[in-house]
Amino acid sequence: MSETIDFKDLNAIPSVRTGIDVLMRDDFALLHGSNIGLITNHTGISRDGIATADILCQAGGIKLKTLFGPEHGIRGKLDEQVADGNDEKTGLPIYSLYGPRTEPSPEQLEGLDTLVFDVQDIGCRFYTYLSTLGHCLLAASKRKMRFIVLDRPNPIGGVAVEGPLADETRLSFTAFHPIPVRHGMTLGELALLINAERDWKAEIIVVKCEGWKRGDWWDTAGLTWVNPSPNMRSLTQATIYPGVGLLEMTNLSVGRGTDTPFEVLGAPYIEGRALAYALNARNLPGVRFIPVRFTPQASVFAGESCGGVNIIVTDRNRFTPVRTGLEIALTLRELYLEQWQASKFITLLANRRTMDGILAGDDYNALSRRFLPDAKGFLQVRSHFLLYP
């Protein structure tokens, strides 16, 4: 007989405890006596929806002194460089780490002994919250401060790993460390990996999630979805993003400025029926393509009618987003050799050998042979830093 749950009692509904929930349950013992700087945004909340900044500000025995915000700001609403400011609710200073400064300055860290990180990632290398984690970890290492990660689930699962590693020579704010495009790790795990591989010797403590397993997706966690950024509005879009997001530095609209970012892509020079037919003929696992026309209201081709495709994930457990993005690139190269700016694809791909294969017109099997050995090596490396079964 199945277990009976009273769905009116929220405490009876199974859900993952994120790092902040575990910290609260343990009466903040890890932070007692600490002077804290908190790196967070609107995704840093308890499972009851209370902001981590508010929780730590009111907790006894600790002193929250400073807030640091990643891309999109503390409230997650901005799609531009973010200015410093003050938090209306707590009155604390907020220092932006998305603009001229990406790492806390020594002056901003004065009087602090602990940095706490609580931001929700989506499991993709070029999503910039990972870079903010890395820059803050480096700052903590330089000053010999504790660095505490309040961990959160990887919403698209912690098993699948896909795509080429970023070249050491192409590291940037959208490629902080040489890892695959889809890394299958939590930010807590990545903090441990980066610290070890760069020999920073930072004192890292990861407050692990409880109840999350590597094979779990967000919808099995019992946690409320909060848009991690203005154009990441659903788990479906997060699932597609590691593939379609790769394309957005080229002359394509990936749906920014529409109601369904990353679920559509196109351009004025594309004939949607031809692209959909060519992509469906590749028989990619777990996905189909429907021809559409759309007019983005912002970003690339704003106000222009675009032909393109709607991306329909039919089986997320078979769907391979990075392969899909690479196959789309190969198809665009084949159909729109003169119009599509293939050379800009390397910006987020960040891997020269794979880019050379795209420019040479490799099929996917040949292309994947260019990066699979490194990807297999990464799987061995990451196994030493995994925290969840």
Image (cartoon, rainbow, N blue to C red):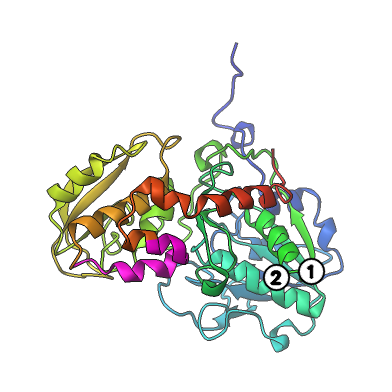
What amino acid type should be assigned to the residue bearing mark 1? Ala
Residue 177 quadrant: bottom right
What amino acid type should be assigned to the residue bearing mark 2? Leu
Residue lying at 72% horizontally and 51% vertically, measured from the top left: 385
Residue 176 position within the rendered picture, expressed as x and y whole percent measured from the top left: 57, 69
Residue 175 position within the rendered picture, expressed as x and y whole percent measured from the top left: 53, 68
Residue lying at 57% horizontally and 73% vertically, measured from the top left: 69
User: Would you say residue 349 sits in the magenta stretch?
Assistant: yes
Q: Magenta stretch: dominant SS?
A: helix
92 over 226 or under it: above or below: below
The CA distance from mark 2 to mark 1 is 7 Å
Q: Are marks 2 and 1 in contact (CB under 8 Å)?
A: yes
Q: Which residue is mark 2?
A: 137
User: Would you say residue 140 sits in the magenta stretch?
Assistant: no
Residue 315 quadrant: top left
**Quarter of the figure that contains the N terminus:** top right
Answer yes or no: is residue 234 visible. no
Please provide the residue range marked out in magenta: 339-356
Point out which mark residue 202 bears: 1
Mark 2 crowdedness (10 Å alpha carbons): few <14, some 14-19, many ≥20: many
**Quarter of the figure that contains the C terminus:** top right
Q: Secondary structure at mark 2?
A: helix
Residue lying at 67% horizontally and 85% vertically, measured from the top left: 105
